[in-house]
């Protein structure tokens, strides 16, 4: 790759690596409301606050790195989803995006249900008092113990993922003298990610039972015969970070076709369909996510139209957004440790966290943005890569971004839109201590998941 050095050095933003995606933003101090949570603002002095508390104070009290979660924003997003779908549909928050007992309580207060996919998530949900009937249990390989706990607890639905599981759940329910409400997860041959979707040949993955070759129809046949199961519907989840509704359209059409086949063969109209999660959020200013009310309207119209065409009553719809609720509500706050200009390339900014608190950049090539938040700067923009402190060159938090050229060790920088799949996928790599999650609201901050300590590490290491 050819790169030419700017005479004034690499801190000047007009030297971009070949094929670089964008020019520096017009104003480095601006905070785009698309990617920052609702109560984040920069005051006239230049300091950034969330929930009415300045980040410098938060850093002092809670340390860095740390995730700060805007409770008002989280609750508002829950309400937006609940109101958009109304009483005719159910919203299940996907706990895998981020789960804690405080989150479970907020979900209850805001009228949402919860999707869990492991015994650990189920335990957290029940410990925080989520009524079992408002929980959906997922997973492609639920252990016998997990199935037993879910059935015993009385979860509202178990989403069946394989032929073996149909039998396992049925037997467990029968043994416990119960009839378990279940959905069958089908693979509709659609895979959608971000702006694109592919509508053929995506059965080659581990989840669900394929519609193709009549397998899903066979799964329904078996489930309907088993006394331990009450088959309430069909489930489909087509991918993540989706902006385009076309994939959902194909998925809904295929699920409704299956409902029609079931009616024709068994004389039964299954009352529910779940269209999964996967709705996209803005990680950078280039992303344009849809609002919950647009999504609800689009999905409702698609299902109603397809059902009318098939002569079916419209089933009750449910959805499972995770990222779209929690993703935009948090940012990760880091302290800058070193600033290393690489002549003609870019400046490497090392922070006190890294791939242990955000694996998404390394794992999915995810894009993030970053801002200097402890002060205002009118310095020139410089092209940076924000990296962590792990022993690995792929330890990148933000691949390409601009920060002011006077950035210095000790400054606080924040990466927005880290509420989903960051703390929940955090690791102890290099014996890093996983950061806390601090909820901020109306001038008050409280830890909802505490920072790990070295004692925590030693407690697991039995010597
Ligand atoms: N429902 C089911 C059945 C799912 O498998 C998922 C996500 C969701 C709902 C929630 O999807 P969301 O609305 O949050 O996109 N670690 C990846 C995402 C993996 C998603 C797995 N399933 C990431 O960081 O992008």
Image (cartoon, helix red, strand yellow):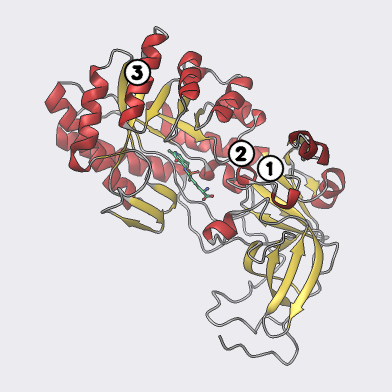
Q: Label 3 neighbourhood size at 10 Å, few (<14), some (14-19), many (20+)?
A: many
The residue at the point 81 percent across, 68 percent down is 338
- Pointer 3 with pointer 2, Cβ within 8 A: no
Q: What residue does disc 3 label?
A: 170
Question: Image height check: is 450 above or below 403?
Answer: above
Q: Nearer the viewer, mark 3 or mark 1?
A: 3
Which residue reaches farthest left? Answer: 264
**In this view of the protein, can residue 276 be seen by the observer?**
yes
**Mark 2 packing: few (<14 Cα in 10 Å), some, or many (20+)?**
many
Q: Quadrant of residue 313?
A: top left
Left or right: 157 in relation to 256: right
Q: Which residue is mark 1?
A: 69
Disc 2 is placed on an element classified as: helix
The residue furthest top is 177
- Which residue is identified by label 2? 74
| CA–CA distance in space, label 3 to label 1 | 40 Å
Specify the quadrant that holds the C terminus.
top right
Kindly indicate whether the residue at mark 1 contacts the one at mark 2 (C-beta within 8 angstroms).
yes
């Amino acid at each position: 790759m050819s790169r030419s050095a700017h005479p004034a050095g690499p801190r000047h933003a007009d030297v971009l690596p070949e094929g670089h995606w964008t020019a520096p933003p017009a104003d480095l101090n601006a905070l785009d409301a698309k990617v920052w949570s609702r109560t984040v603002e920069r005051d006239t002095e230049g300091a950034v606050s969330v929930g009415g508390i300045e980040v410098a104070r938060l850093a002092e009290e809670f340390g860095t790195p740390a995730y700060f979660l805007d409770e008002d924003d989280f609750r508002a997003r829950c309400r937006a989803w609940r109101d958009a779908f109304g009483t005719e549909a159910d919203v299940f928050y996907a706990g895998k995006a981020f789960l804690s007992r405080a989150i479970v309580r907020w979900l209850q207060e805001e009228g949402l249900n919860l999707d869990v996919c492991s015994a650990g998530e189920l335990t957290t949900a029940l410990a925080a008092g989520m009524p079992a009937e408002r929980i959906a249990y997922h997973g492609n390989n639920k252990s016998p113990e997990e199935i037993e706990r879910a059935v015993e607890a009385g979860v509202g639905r178990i989403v069946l993922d394989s032929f073996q599981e149909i039998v396992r759940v049925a037997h467990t329910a029968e043994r416990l003298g119960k009839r378990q409400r279940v959905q069958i997860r089908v693979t509709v041959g659609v895979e959608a990610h971000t702006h694109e979707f592919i509508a053929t040949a995506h059965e080659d993955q581990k989840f669900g039972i394929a519609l193709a070759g009549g397998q899903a129809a066979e799964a329904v046949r078996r489930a309907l015969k088993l006394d331990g199961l009450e088959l309430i519907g069909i489930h489909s989840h087509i991918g993540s970070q989706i902006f385009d509704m076309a994939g959902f359209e194909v998925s809904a059409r295929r699920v409704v076709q299956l409902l029609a086949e079931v009616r024709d063969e068994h004389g039964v109209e299954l009352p529910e369909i779940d269209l999964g999660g996967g709705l996209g959020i803005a990680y950078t200013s280039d992303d344009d996510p849809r609002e919950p009310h647009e999504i609800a309207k689009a999905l409702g119209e698609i299902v109603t139209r397809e059902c009318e065409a098939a002569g079916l009553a419209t089933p009750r719809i449910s959805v499972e957004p995770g990222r779209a609720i929690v993703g935009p509500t948090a940012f990760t706050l880091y302290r800058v440790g070193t600033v290393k200009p690489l002549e003609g390339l870019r400046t490497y900014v090392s922070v006190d966290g890294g791939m242990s608190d955000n694996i998404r950049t390394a794992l999915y090539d995810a894009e993030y943005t970053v801002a200097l938040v402890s002060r205002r700067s009118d310095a020139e923009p410089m092209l940076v890569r924000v990296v962590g402190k792990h022993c690995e060159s792929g330890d990148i938090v933000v691949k390409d971004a601009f920060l002011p050229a006077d950035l210095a060790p000790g400054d606080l920088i924040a990466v927005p839109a880290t509420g989903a799949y960051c703390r929940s996928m955090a690791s102890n790599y290099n014996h890093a201590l996983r950061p806390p999650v601090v909820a901020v609201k109306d001038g008050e901050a409280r830890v909802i998941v505490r920072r790990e300590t070295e004692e925590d590490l030693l407690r697991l290491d039995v010597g």
